[in-house]
Amino acid sequence: MANMQDIKRRINSSKSIRKITKAMEMVAASNLRRAQAQAESSRPYAEKLKEVVASVAASARDLEHPLLVSRPVKKTAYLVMTSDRGLAGGFNANLLRYLTRNIQQRHQSKDEYGIFIVGRKGRDFLKRRDYPLVDEVTGVPDSPEFSDIKPIANKAVEQFAQGIFDELILVYNEFINPMTQRPMEKRLLPLGDLQEGEQGVSSTPYEYEPSPEGILSVLLPRYAETLVYSALLESKASEFGARMTAMGNANDNATEMIDSLTLQFNRARQAAITQELSEIVAGANALS
């Protein structure tokens, strides 16, 4: 009977866990739809801003803005997007493994790079292993605004412009679909892809006030920060997709465990009933 009580306790515990994982799966699915819509709505703005920046850059060909200048890479900055919470499958682990592997392959010492980290999970992981953290942001809401990422993005862009870093690389999870998120990196600075964008720039002449150079000095940092924000939205969509999948798997596993424990419970109960019947029959035979 004690064994049956233990099995019953495990069944009730598994049912409670399944209720939690089911609720978390539904919340993640709701957040995923919102994050996908937010990421998709930001793309037209980023594309139009790139077109405008490329157009202005084409009108100021002699300008050597710090964000456009390529120089020998002596020190690299990484801006890494992780989450504040776990229970998202391999979302954080895969990204951090990808980051540390690339760092080990490229750099011989900690003096050759610095890390700007978004998310408590990434910060704790890197701090425990004594990686050189330059700045951090935690507590980013599920529906982030540009203001949530602007301080760290602005600091990373400014340090590149000042020559502290010679390149800035974004590291985040690219959202493929709710089942698939792929760790990737993107070279953010210097903005070398503007030359490619100039090929599609309209030939219509524009007049700039105060000057193309003055406008470009404002637009280039804004464009770089917008790319960081777009990466954050991609990362959020990936996080919710990974969490929804992980909670769905946990829910399925809990159901399988409940079925298995229920079968064990029924077998144990049947064995107990059989044993009691045997004892009754044996007692009756002894009396007769």
Image: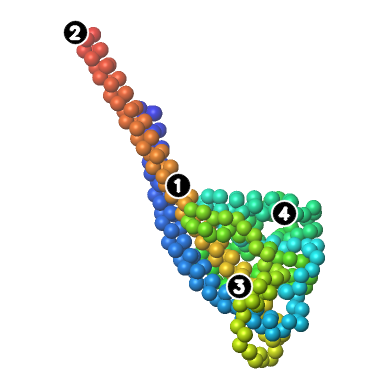
Query: Where is mark 3, residue-wise?
Result: 226
Residue that appears at 30% across and 26% down: 270
Q: Quarter of the image containing the C terminus? A: top left
The secondary element bearing badge 4 is classed as: helix
The residue type indicated by label 2 comes to Ser
Q: Is residue 135 above or below residue 210?
A: above
Identified by mark 4, the residue type is: Ile
Of discs 2 and 1, which sits in the foreground?
A: 1
Question: Is residue 51 visible to us here?
Answer: yes
Tell me which amino acid carries mark 1.
Asn
Which residue reaches farthest left?
288
Q: Position of residue 26 (x, y in %)?
A: 41, 56
Q: Is residue 269 left or right of residue 215?
A: left
The CA span between labels 3 and 1 is 35 Å
Where disc 1 sits, the SS reads helix
Check disc 3 and give the amino acid type.
Answer: Thr
Identify residue for label 4. 103
Q: Secondary structure at mark 3?
A: helix
For the residues bearing labels 3 and 2, Cβ distance under 8 angstroms = no
Residue 227 versus residue 246 in the image, above or below: below
Please provide percent x and percent y for residue 2: 38, 28
Label 2 Cα neighbours within 10 Å, binned few <14 / some 14-19 / many ≥20: few
Query: Which of the 4 image quadrants contains residue 52?
Result: bottom right
- Depth check: 277 or 140 in front? 140
Could you tell which of marks 4 and 3 lies nearer the N-terminus?
A: 4
How packed mark 1 is, by other alpha carbons closer than 10 Å (few <14, some 14-19, many 20 or more), is some
Q: Earlier in the sequence, mark 3 or mark 2?
A: 3
**Which numbered disc covers residue 249?**
1
- The span from disc 4 to disc 3 (Cα, nearest Å) is 25 Å
Can you tell which mark lies on residue 288? 2
Q: CA distance from mark 1 to mark 4?
A: 32 Å
